[in-house]
Amino acid sequence: MVGWSEERFNEISEQVTGFMKGNGFQLKNVTFVPISGLNGDNLAVRSEDPALSWYKGETLIQALEDSEPLARALEKPFRMSISEIFKSQQSQLIISGRIESGTVQTGESIVVQPSGEPASIRSIEVDTEIQDWAVAGQNVSLGVYGIDPIHIRVGDIISSKAEPIETSDLLTMKVLAFEHLMPMPVDVHRGRLHAAGRIQSIPAVLNKTTGATEKKNPKVVAPAKVARIVVKLESK
């Protein structure tokens, strides 16, 4: 923010809102919060700067905590992407990340992909508090055992052993095109990981708002269009 200008804040909010609306985002799920990462203003504690007295909304942490995960995410199998790996003061192996879907509880057996190695959960920590279980949308630290750390990397996916996620080198995805897309080489990025691949086919161009098919099997996807594509990776 430039001097906590309310006018500048509203200007940026309107610009971003227009972009997100045009690309199919539901505006009821969008919140704007003026913050300062340098000074910590409005991150976890409301800013006391008089220049920001015009803002009456939530802090960033409050806005994140008030956002509810979609109900369907809770009903899906447990999936979590690993963002950090470390050992506790008691030398317990800890893996941290955000639960993308499903639920997890202590004592549960899990599988780490792509290594396929099994492990078990000894402890669950949510917001520095020990819990017996956690759900989609929460950032957690899981104490695990029964697995060698060499089989775990940042970016790996863990899932329930009862409903494991499968590895694949063929991906079907919904994408927003920023340039022309056609059968062509691409790089696929997820978190800190990336893999080379190729757009194998383009089944459909989709309506940004409804997701309905507008055109089947197009040869090219124009910029700003949403499409369903199939990507073949060089390796799993």
Image (cartoon, rainbow, N blue to C red):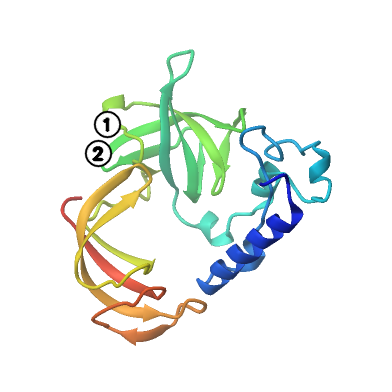
Residue positioned most to the bottom? 215
Question: On the rendered structure, is 148 left or right of 208?
Answer: left
Q: Position of residue 191 (x, y in %)?
A: 38, 45
Vertically, is 15 above or below 3? below
Question: On the rendered structure, is 60 left or right of 88?
Answer: right
> Looking at the image, how many numbered discs can be counted on the residues?
2
Give the camera-side residue of 140 and 173.
173
Q: Position of residue 41 (x, y in %)?
A: 70, 37
Question: On the rendered structure, is 218 left or right of 57?
Answer: left
Q: Amino acid at mark 1?
A: His
* Residue at figure coordinates x 28%, y 54% from the top left: 188
Mark toward the start of the polypeptide (1 vs 2): 2
Q: Position of residue 91 (x, y in %)?
A: 43, 14
Visible in this render: residue 161?
Answer: yes
**Quick one: label 1, few (<14), some, or many (20+) residues within 10 Å?**
some
Q: Quadrant of residue 207?
A: bottom left
Q: Amino acid at mark 2?
A: Ser
Secondary element type, mark 2: loop
Secondary element type, mark 1: helix
Q: Which residue is mark 2?
A: 115
* Residue at figure coordinates x 20%, y 57% from the top left: 197
Q: Which residue is mark 1?
A: 151
